[in-house]
Image (tube, helix red, strand yellow):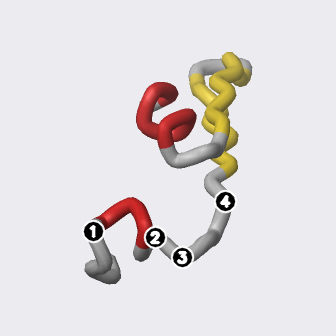
Amino acid sequence: MKARCERAGGSLSVEAVKPQGMKLTLNIPLHDTKDRTRGEKL
């Protein structure tokens, strides 16, 4: 997941949350993906 976020220009952080959990913080930039998909919109 972290590698995918970084390839998209974002970031991912994982934190342990007590008592039994995990907190994922995901930041992905919202931009036009036209250049990355050979002219096709996602």
Q: Is residue 39 above or below residue 3?
A: below
In percent of width and height, residue 23 lies at 65, 33
30 lies left or right of 18: left
Disc 4 versus disc 3: nearer the observer: 3
Q: What label sits on residue 32 in the rendered view?
A: 3
Of the image marks 4 and 1, the number of the one nearer the N terminus? 4
Disc 1 versus disc 2: nearer the observer: 1
| Residue type, numbered disc 3 | Asp
Q: In which quarter of the image is the C terminus?
A: bottom left
Give the CA distance from mark 4 to mark 3: 10 Å
* Badge 1: residue crowd in 10 Å (few <14, some 14–19, many ≥20): few
Disc 3 versus disc 1: nearer the observer: 1
- Residue tagged 1: 38
Disc 2 versus disc 4: nearer the observer: 2
Tell me which residue sits at (49%, 38%) in the image.
7
In percent of width and height, residue 30 lies at 63, 69
| Residue type, numbered disc 4 | Pro
Tell me which residue sits at (39%, 61%) in the image.
36
Give the CA distance from mark 4 to mark 1: 19 Å
Q: In this view, does 27 lie above or below 20?
A: below
Image quadrant of residue 31?
A: bottom right
- Residue tagged 2: 33
Q: Quadrant of the N terminus?
A: top left
